[in-house]
């Protein structure tokens, strides 16, 4: 779908998911993440960049597990995560839009739980590449977990936390031969609708991940 079509559909409130491709499993148990490999940190930083051309090839389950663990997995006893959050509220949920459905990442169970049995990649942003790249991540703040954060600061704190997750994804991508771009040019209402979010859940950002396309 072109950006112009998406903008028009978005204005009409008609940006909708496509039917799921393949079996929408209710849960996908991920293989244990491999916590080694990839480029050393300084080399990954040197390689980090945004890409807007993606191949359609899917990521293996192992690569997906590694990616999500790098993004926001549990990295120590007690449930600490790979990205910080104000007062350790851990208010961000990472949703994964795949051709077979949209899933919420459960870091503790290392599992993806189905939230929508449709292909809502195209709903995750106005840019055309989001439709065909193998996956789009969506970062959602759950305001019910931020009871200790003053109301006026909840959105900015959650956005900072989502930014840290996004940079984890950038560095993982740079270090593991993947392409990615963080995106704020998105239709938040359409995404919230497609994911079935409540009024306490706020869509912040989306991020496309895949293998580099022709111009990588
Ligand atoms: C908060 C934020 C929102 C962004 N939104 C978009 C977006 O909607 N679409 C897009 O293609 N790039 C988006 N970007 C990526 C920037 O365009 C990109 O980081 C910038 O051009 C610098 O390029 P680099 O990441 O390769 O260094 C966004 C970046 C940030 C930090």
Image (cartoon, rainbow, N blue to C red):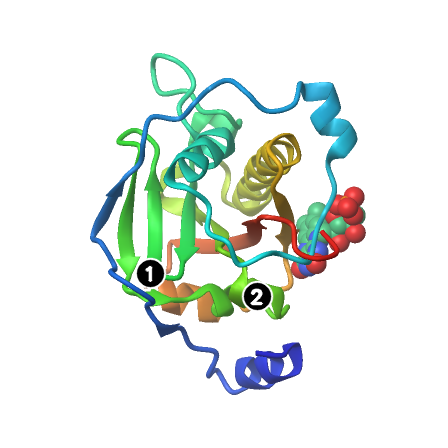
The spot of residue 133 in percent (x, y) is 54, 59
Q: Which mark is residue 125?
A: 2
Residue 146 seen from this side: no
Residue at 38% across / 66% down in the picture? Answer: 119
Residue 80 seen from this side: yes
Splitting the image into 4 quarters, where does residue 169 fall?
A: top right
Judged left or right of residue 37, residue 140 is left
Judged left or right of residue 75, residue 177 is right
Q: Which residue ends up furthest to the left in the rendered image? A: 26
Image height of 3 relative to 168, above or below:
below
> Mark 1 Cα within 10 Å, few/some/many (few <14, many 20+)?
some
> Mark 2 Cα within 10 Å, few/some/many (few <14, many 20+)?
many
**Which mark is in front, 2 or 1?**
1
Ligand 1 has an atom within 8 Å of the beta carbon of the residue at disc 2: yes
- At mark 2, the secondary structure is loop
Q: Nearer the viewer, residue 199 or 83?
A: 83
* Tag count: 2
Image height of 128 relative to 11, above or below:
above
Q: Which residue ends up furthest to the right in the rendered image? A: 46
Image height of 72 relative to 178, above or below:
above
Q: Nearer the viewer, residue 145 or 140?
A: 140
Residue at 45% across / 36% down in the picture? Answer: 63
The spot of residue 174 in percent (x, y) is 66, 35
Residue at 53% across / 59% down in the picture? Answer: 56
Q: Nearer the viewer, residue 5 or 185?
A: 5
- At mark 1, the secondary structure is loop
Judged left or right of residue 89, residue 166 is right
Comes first in the chain, label 2 or label 1: 1
The spot of residue 21 in percent (x, y) is 34, 67
Residue on which disc 1 sits: 100
Q: Tell me the quadrant of the picture where the N terminus can be found.
A: bottom right
């Amino acid at each position: 779908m072109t950006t112009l079509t998406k903008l028009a559909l978005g204005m009409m409130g008609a940006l909708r998911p496509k039917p799921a491709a393949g079996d929408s499993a209710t849960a996908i148990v991920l293989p244990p993440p491999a916590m080694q490999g990839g480029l050393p940190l300084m080399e990954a930083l040197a390689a980090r960049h945004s890409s807007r051309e993606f191949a359609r090839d899917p990521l293996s389950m192992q690569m997906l597990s590694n990616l999500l663990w790098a993004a926001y997995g549990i990295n120590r006893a007690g449930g600490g995560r790979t990205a910080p959050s104000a007062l350790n509220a851990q208010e961000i949920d990472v949703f994964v839009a795949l051709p077979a459905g949209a899933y919420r990442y459960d870091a503790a169970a290392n599992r993806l739980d189905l939230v929508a049995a449709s292909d809502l990649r195209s709903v995750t942003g106005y840019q055309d590449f989001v439709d065909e790249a193998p996956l789009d991540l969506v970062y959602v703040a759950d305001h019910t977990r931020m009871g200790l954060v003053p109301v006026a600061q909840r959105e900015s704190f959650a956005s900072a936390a989502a930014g840290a997750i996004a940079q984890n994804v950038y560095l993982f991508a740079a270090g593991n031969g993947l392409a990615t771009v963080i995106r704020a040019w998105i239709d938040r209402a359409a995404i919230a609708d497609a994911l079935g979010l409540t009024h306490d859940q706020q869509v912040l950002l989306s991020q496309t991940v895949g293998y580099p396309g022709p111009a990588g």
